Image (cartoon, grey):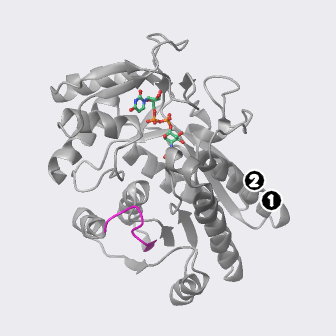
């Protein structure tokens, strides 16, 4: 299988490329390094001992994209080229809608022109908005997103449903990620947010490393066991493996639009995360209780049963491994 991976140098893209190469696929990566670094490509080669094709370009550049489809016999496409910062999306809605939605449309249109109809989309638990019930199953109500990032995911899901409705020879998998953390066990690739991190785990590791002074715990008065927000953290390597299973499903069964939660099914609070990190690494994480962050919900975790039953996929790595690998990456890369 020749798989086109947009955003393949990014955090989730690069981990997925490793799993694709390790399972014998031919890989073509597109990335413009707008939120990643060229060194990641060398790291992928070092980890897998395998080669792949690479195009440095914006995935929304139609002419360049056509050239990629001309030069390669692509079977399927995995799209990781979206912008992903919630806070930034509130400040730059046009940039987010343009990159995430227009980019996806250019990609899908080009796929259609070249008769490539297998597509795996990186969606997010954020499409559930305020959860209808916990744990979240795929048939829970979606909508009520509170930022352009989340809304772009919701819109693209709808676009994909409409495409499938118009032509059911497409094979589409929508994967709703919960909270990806961790890094490849080699420590050669990991999460590299620009500036001060917004997400919990990257913040925790940078407090432990001394790069940041203390963690602000956003609210301790939620209706949760310890009052802090509860989320479904999932190791990025498990998440990457979910994509391989989804691709296999599209190859085997074809002609369908499938939606899966990719999560562990277990919720941990902010303070659980701090404690687990301290216990695993032996480093102290200084924190203070701060006001709630606007747009946050109390509790969000998945019911991952559908992915288990239909894809044969379950998340295998525990919280300790998530903490260990996040910490290992930061230490290896240096500050
Ligand atoms: C987790 C918990 C915070 C930072 C977002 C997106 C989602 C996905 C992942 C990705 C919450 C608390 C956090 C901090 C804190 N998108 N927290 N102090 O908000 O669940 O999900 O990121 O690209 O679509 O919505 O993740 O890691 O920001 O927060 O107390 O400095 O940690 O309040 O309870 P979230 P998060």
Q: Looking at the picture, does residue 181 appear above or below residue 110?
A: above
Of the pair 284 and 48, the residue shown nearer to us: 284
> Magenta region, mostly helix, strand or loop?
loop
Direction from residue 301 to residue 235 in the image, left or right: left
Q: Position of residue 96 (x, y in %)?
A: 58, 58
Q: Looking at the picture, does residue 314 appear above or below residue 14?
A: above
Residue ID at (31%, 28%) = 215
Of the pair 48 and 192, the residue shown nearer to us: 192
Q: Position of residue 280 (x, y in %)?
A: 21, 27
Q: Looking at the picture, does residue 146 appear above or below residue 300?
A: below
Residue annotated with mark 2: 158
Image marks 2 and 1: residues in contact by CB distance under 8 Å: yes
- Residue reaching furthest right? 166
Would residue 59 be seen by someone viewing this image from the given angle?
A: yes
Residue ID at (15%, 51%) = 334
Instruction: Report if residue 23 lies within the magenta region.
Output: no
Which quarter of the figure has residue 33? bottom left
- Packing grade of label 1 (10 A; few <14, some 14-19, many >=20) is few
Number of residue marks? 2
- Spatial separation of the CA atoms under disc 2 and disc 1: 6 Å
Would residue 1 be seen by someone viewing this image from the given angle?
A: no
* Residues shaded magenta: 29-37
Instruction: Report if residue 36 lies within the magenta region.
Output: yes
Of the pair 147 and 334, the residue shown nearer to us: 147
Q: Position of residue 27 (x, y in %)?
A: 43, 72
Q: Position of residue 201 (x, y in %)?
A: 35, 36
The mark found on residue 162 in the picture is 1
Of the pair 290 and 311, the residue shown nearer to us: 290
Direction from residue 77 to residue 127 in the image, left or right: right
Residue ID at (21%, 52%) = 186
- Name the secondary structure under disc 1: helix
- Name the secondary structure under disc 2: helix
């Amino acid at each position: 299988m020749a798989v086109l991976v947009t955003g393949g140098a990014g955090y989730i893209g690069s981990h997925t490329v490793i799993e694709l190469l390790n399972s014998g696929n031919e890989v073509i990566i597109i990335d413009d390094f707008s939120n990643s670094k060229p060194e990641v490509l060398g790291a992928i080669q070092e980890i897998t001992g395998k080669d792949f094709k690479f195009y440095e370009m914006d995935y929304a550049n139609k002419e360049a994209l056509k050239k990629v489809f001309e030069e390669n016999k692509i079977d399927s496409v995995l799209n990781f080229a979206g912008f992903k910062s919630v806070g930034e999306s509130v400040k730059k809605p046009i940039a987010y809608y343009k990159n995430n939605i227009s980019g996806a449309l250019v990609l899908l249109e080009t796929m259609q022109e070249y008769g490539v109809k297998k597509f795996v989309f990186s969606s997010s638990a954020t499409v559930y908005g305020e959860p209808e019930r916990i744990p979240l199953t795929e048939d829970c109500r979606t909508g009520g997103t509170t930022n352009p990032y989340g809304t772009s995911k919701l819109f693209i899901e709808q676009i994909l449903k409409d495409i499938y409705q118009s032509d059911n020879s497409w094979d589409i998998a929508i994967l709703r990620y919960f909270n990806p953390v961790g890094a490849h066990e080699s420590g050669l690739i990991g999460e590299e947010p620009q500036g001060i991190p917004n997400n919990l785990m990257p913040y925790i590791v940078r407090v432990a490393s001394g790069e940041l002074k203390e963690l602000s715990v956003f609210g301790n008065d939620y209706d949760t066991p310890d009052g802090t927000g509860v989320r479904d953290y999932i190791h990025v390597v498990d998440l990457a493996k979910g994509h391989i299973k989804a691709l296999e499903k599209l190859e085997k069964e074809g002609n369908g639009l499938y939606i899966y939660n990719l999560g562990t099914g277990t919720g941990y609070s902010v303070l659980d995360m701090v404690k687990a990190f301290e216990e695993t690494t032996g480093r102290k994480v200084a924190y203070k209780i701060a006001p709630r962050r606007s747009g946050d919900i109390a509790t969000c975790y998945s019911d991952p049963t559908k992915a288990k039953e239909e894809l044969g996929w379950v998340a295998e790595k525990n919280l300790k491994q998530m903490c260990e690998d996040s910490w290992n990456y930061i230490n290896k890369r240096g500050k």
